[in-house]
Image (cartoon, rainbow, N blue to C red):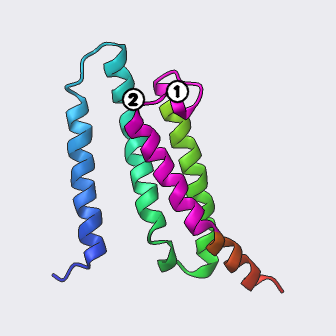
Amino acid sequence: MDLHPQQLTWAALLGRWIEFAQSAVALPDDATGRAWKQAVPPIIGLQAVTMALGEVDQLAPDQRALGIDRANILIERHTKELLDAFAATDASQLHPMLIELIADAWATMKIIEPRRRRDAEKTQF
């Protein structure tokens, strides 16, 4: 069976995310441990959205705008979930690794966003 490199990348990431989620079970049952356990899904979500944005050009132009809008919503949702997990009022109060993860997602969105506008201009009559 011939797998494309992107399929291998997604498969490798899925394996890593499974290992990451499984390792969270071993975290202590104190406030910090519970916060990190609660942070696992949004961490994985932010990584997945950031990775998927890198492949947005593979979508048909009429689907690209929807994909980009959905990614924007997911980045906002996952960021809020991280803030909630650590009882933070803004991202600057999070662990530096989480700040970087959120920043990477938004930086990727900033690169991709002009494509959504370009596609919208092309479809206007």
Secondary structure at badge 1 equals: helix
**Residues in magenta, as a range:** 84-113
| 118 in relation to 31, above or below | below
Q: For the N terminus, which image quadrant?
A: bottom left
Disc 2 to disc 1, C-alpha distance: 9 Å
User: Quick one: 109 or 64, which is closer to the camera?
Assistant: 109
Q: Is residue 20 magenta?
A: no
Residue, x 27% and y 48% (percent of image)? Answer: 17
Q: Which label sits on residue 15?
A: none
Question: What residue do we see at 21% from left, 37% from top?
Answer: 22
The three-letter amino acid code for the residue at tag 2 is Gln
Location of residue 56 in the rendering, given as x and y in whole percent from the top left corner:
50, 72
Q: Which residue is mark 2?
A: 38
The one nearer the camera, 22 or 86, is 86
Q: Are the two marked residues, 2 and 1, in contact with CB atoms closer than 8 angstroms? A: yes
Pick out the residue farthest to the left.
1
Looking at the picture, does residue 88 appear above or below residue 45? above
Identify the residue at image location x=60%, y=50%: 73
Question: At numbered mark 2, what does the secondary structure look like: helix, strand or loop?
Answer: helix
> Residue 119: x and y, percent?
67, 79
Q: Is residue 67 visible in the rendered structure shown here?
A: no
The residue indicated by pointer 1 is: 84
The amino acid pointed to by label 1 is Asp
Frontmost residue, 90 versus 22? 90
